[in-house]
Amino acid sequence: MASLSTNSLSFRAPSIQSSRFSQVLRKPSSFQAISFGSFQSLKSLRLQISCAAKPETVQKVSDIVKEQLALSADTALTAESKFSALGADSLDTVEIVMALEEKFNISVEETDAQNITTIQEAADLIEDLVQKKPAA
Amino acid sequence: MLSSLIPLQLPSRMQTHLWYILPNEVNNKSLLKHYTQLLSQHEKDSISGMQSDELNKKNALLARTLVRTTLARYHTNNNDNTVVDPRALKFKKNLYGKPEVDWEVDDTTTNHPKLQFNISHTDSLIACGVTLNAPVGIDVEDKTRKMRHDVLSLAKRFYSSEEVKFLSSVEDTESQRKEFIKLWTLKEAYVKALGKGFSASPFNTFSIIRSDAETYNLCDQAGEWKFRLLELAASSHYAAICIEGEDGQEAMNVIVHKTIPFVEDELISI
């Protein structure tokens, strides 16, 4: 069970992969109820959770990547799949970023746009940006 | 029996040597096997680890082969003027991830001029640009490449406002697409020449403008960056080259060769 304090999250249970816990993190309303000193700790926390980005997000990113790179529908992509290893060049990457912006209605910073190298990174960035938007 | 690598004359200052391979022309299994033997273990592992089809893996092999054999040819062993072993070259990355040759400072058995290089590839063409002492960036692109998004939308999102203005003034859609790609290769070449990664120079922070049919320049530039845009391989590809020149230097001179390492070189007039 996790306890929340002003600046950090602490855990007793070593395994933090329960989906119920990750749902608590995802709901914007629960952020408003709890005040944090900064989002820094949240971000580093998320990177420690291997399946942090929702599976649906990873799937949507994979679909967009497959479409941009004209990969067959049954190409097996993992979250760690690197765009470059899939045959993407930098123009493909910006097109993927633009498609992600359209799909998720977000705006990616220039410095982030060309730093995304894997499906996981894209999914994490998307969820980060989606959370920062006013609750819909 | 494969011929040995033939030594090359160094590029002069303000000169870029551009070498390219057409993967479609390189299919001989034993030649490809020979190429594989030139690579470092890290390179071999990297290629076999690619989650990609055999063509992409072959192209990755050809890219590393092109870099190693080309750079090796500019270096001879002092005792007999033979080309150094391509396997002996070591590579490292600069602070921002740009690949460069890692010279062994104490090695007196070979001459090692401070060559700089940059590579670029598409599915159908792999190129390596080499200069002496001048930072260089190159980018190649298939002329017929279609974007999934509307060209002007992409430009508005990623290019500078001057460039968007220029592209908007191109009336024909097909010409607009070509101009977009030309600008893409020039902008990529510049960022790669700078060598500080894309974050240091986002595409919308600088403009490349064409002053006449063949001359491209950086708007408001600090430093003397020279650009050339070429068409390679029966005009199937655009190739952009960017090097850092010196104040008052004249335009960049480019020498282009098509090559199949260990087999043949063909001088291309441009």
Image (cartoon, grey):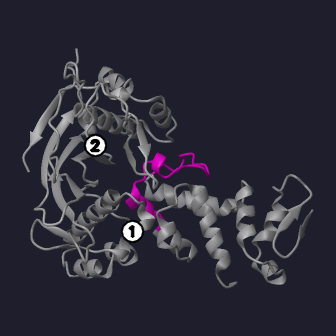
The residue wearing badge 1 is: B201
Measured Cα–Cα span from mark 2 to mark 1 = 25 Å
Give amino acid for label 2: Lys
- Specify whether A121 is left or right of B61: right
Secondary structure beneath dot 1 equals loop
Q: Residue furthest top?
A: B1
Task: Report x, y in % for residue A116.
Answer: 52, 60
Give amino acid for label 1: Ser
Q: Which residues are magenta?
A: A71-97
Q: Residues within 10 Å of mark 1 (few under 14, many from 20)?
A: some
Q: Residues within 10 Å of mark 2 (few under 14, many from 20)?
A: few
Write down the quadrant of residue B30 in the picture: top left
Q: Is residue B95 above or below residue A95?
A: above
Q: Chain of mark 1?
A: B
Write down the quadrant of residue B25 in the picture: top left
Answer yes or no: are tags 2 and 1 on the same subunit.
yes
The residue wearing badge 2 is: B114
Secondary structure beneath dot 2 equals loop
Task: Report x, y in % for residue B211.
Answer: 13, 74
Between B54 and B140, the one lying in front of the other is B140
Q: Quadrant of the N terminus of chain B?
A: top left
- Specify whether A128 is left or right of B181: right
Instruction: Please tell me which residue is depicted at 79% across the width and 83% down the height of the picture.
Output: A32
Residue A95 seen: no
Instruction: Please tell me which residue is depicted at 28% across the width and 28% down the height of the picture.
Output: B110
